[in-house]
Amino acid sequence: MSRRRKNRSKNSLQALVHKNRHSILTFWRIIKYGIASFFRNAWLSVAATAIMFVTLTIISVTLISRNVLEDTVADISSNIEMSIYISQNFADPEIVSEITESIMSLDSVVSVTYISPDQARDDFRAEATAAGDIDALQALNEATNMFPGTFNIEVTNLDDLSELEYLVEHDELIIAAIDPRHPPSFLSEHREAIDNIAGVVVFIERGGVIIAAIFVVISTLIIFNTIRMAIFNRREEIYMMKLIGANRSFIRGPFIVEATQYGVIAAFITAGLCTAGLFIINENAESIGLVVEPTISMLGSYWPLALLGLIGVGAFIGVFSSFLATQKYLKLQ
């Protein structure tokens, strides 16, 4: 009995080894045939890869642009302060302190800095002196101090000033203290500029998503038709493979490998060109007001994940398209 068990165990082990070898050999043949098919249909492969490259580039540019614009808006938010101007009659330290506390109680406010009328006058004189503006200095010396007290307010999000607006419109002390000659900056002509800055990010994000979705569909259709043409060119070969017992997985495998190559190649090209483009833009970023350095630093730290993400998206589109094409053909057969 023990000898029979040993023989059975030995036979089972040999069968398992043989099965694993056969699986590895089959997998290798699928890879080999897929690569050969890619070069056999060179022009179709180039066209499909080009469309895949355009798709991945649009997706990448959308994500990168969104990140760059968010960093730019964040930088602008840290440098642009919302201003509330109060009359000199309300520049008393106790009133200033009470208004400051009211403003700081808002969740959307990061910090508040108060500039008194005297300090505003001194700052104006210093700027005019540095610029050599004699007329401005003369006018300043002849006029009385008509500068208002100014609350410079830094907010967390330029796109949401609702809390600050509500406070200015409903706080009785602030309403009474506001200088009628100088309305709050975020309620004047500056509001349009603020809305434009905040709206750029939303526009790029939504527009990029729509365009990327359109090109994903186009890529899927083109790769689908490319694989169908490849199947048509190899229909006799596929017929012979079925006659000798090849299963559907073996027939479908090379086409999936071929389509996956479109995504992988396009991903590497996209990654290289987008990275080069970022560095080129970064050279002139300061002159055009863009903040690109944080995005470059992030990609420098996580470039393997970014590259794998591009490869994954490209491979998925290719596999999905080729699976649909082969599935339809095999069903017809």
Image: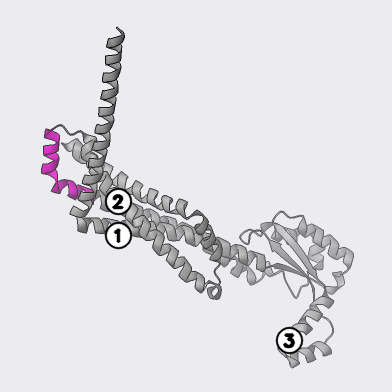
In the rendered image, residue 188 lying in the magenta stretch gets the answer: no
Left of 114 or right of it: where is 16?
Answer: left
First of labels 2, 3 by sequence position: 3
Which is nearer the eye, 254 or 47? 254
SS for dot 2: helix
Magenta span contains residue 241: yes
Left or right of 130, for residue 223: left
Q: Using the image as rendered, state which of residue 205 and residue 195 is in the foreground.
A: 205
Q: CA distance from mark 2 to mark 1?
A: 12 Å
| Location of residue 10 by image quarter | top left
Secondary structure mainly formed by the magenta segment: helix
* Amino acid type indicated by mark 3: Ala
Point out the stretch of residues depicted in magenta: 226-244
Which callout, 2 or 3, points to the residue nearer the camera? 2
Residue 85 coordinates in the image, percent (x, y): 76, 70
Q: Earlier in the sequence, mark 3 or mark 1?
A: 1
Say if 179 sits above or below 318 in the image: below
Measured as percent of width and height from the top left, residue 282 is found at 51, 70
Instruction: Look at the picture and state if 162 lies above or below 193.
Output: above
Q: Amino acid at mark 2?
A: Gln
Identified by mark 1, the residue type is: Ala
- On residue 261, the disc is 2
Q: Residue at x 43, y 55 (%)?
A: 209
Q: Report the residue marked by disc 3.
A: 130
Q: In this image, 224 relative to 127: left or right? A: left
In the figure, 1 relative to 52: above or below? above
Q: Which mark is residue 50?
A: 1
